Image (cartoon, rainbow, N blue to C red):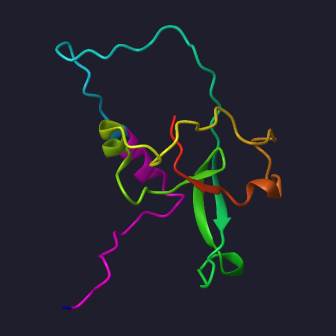
Amino acid sequence: STTSSPTMPSLPFYNDTNTVTSFADGLRSLASHDHPVFVPRRVDENLLYTIGLGLISCPGQSCGGPSGSRFAASMNNISFVLPTSFSILQAQQLGKKGVFTTDFPDNPPLQFDYTAQNISTALSSPVKDTRVK
């Protein structure tokens, strides 16, 4: 048997506004008269999510990012890690413990100027974790 790399898609450039607009315009809801969607009218939680791009080290190997690290997307400085034993949905349905935790933070770990060019280096290395809200 031979192994081969998966075929990678041709992705648009990061600043391709036309592609983003076309994608966003194509999003549709399944809501209809037969399938109404009820939106809560009372806010009972306050959440502030930040989306970031950080660096994660590559122990024992060299990755393609700065200083041999790799880029990692994060929310509130947490980079999601796929569980190895069960999917999150399976774990929830089967009542399996230890696959994920429900303590995803309501706010970023540090307050900062969210529009600044430079932010704290404490936010440059996200935590790898399987937390959900």
Q: Position of residue 119 (x, y in %)?
A: 81, 52
Q: Is residue 18 left or right of residue 15?
A: left
Residue under the point 34% across and 69% down: 9
Residue extending farthest to the top is 42
Task: Report the predominant secondary structure element of the magenta stretch.
Answer: loop
Q: Position of residue 98 (x, y in %)?
A: 47, 47
Count the marks: how many? 0
Instruction: Give the answer, above or below, for where 1 lies relative to 110.
Output: below
Q: Image quadrant of residue 63? A: bottom right
Foreground residue, 5 or 20? 5
Residue under the point 52% across and 41% down: 101
Q: Is residue 48 magenta?
A: no
Foreground residue, 58 or 63? 58
Residue extending farthest to the bottom is 2
Q: Is residue 7 left or right of residue 75?
A: left
Q: Image quadrant of residue 35? A: top left
Q: Position of residue 1 (x, y in %)?
A: 18, 91
Q: Which residues are magenta?
A: 2-24
Residue under the point 25% across and 27% down: 30
Q: Is residue 109 left or right of residue 95?
A: right
Instruction: Give the answer, above or below, for where 36 lies relative to 28.
Output: above
Q: Position of residue 113 (x, y in %)?
A: 81, 41
Q: Is residue 97 left or right of residue 50?
A: left
Q: Is residue 15 magenta?
A: yes
Instruction: Give the answer, above or below, for where 42 lies relative to 116.
Output: above
Foreground residue, 40 or 81? 81
Instruction: Give the answer, above or below, for where 60 lies relative to 7.
Output: below
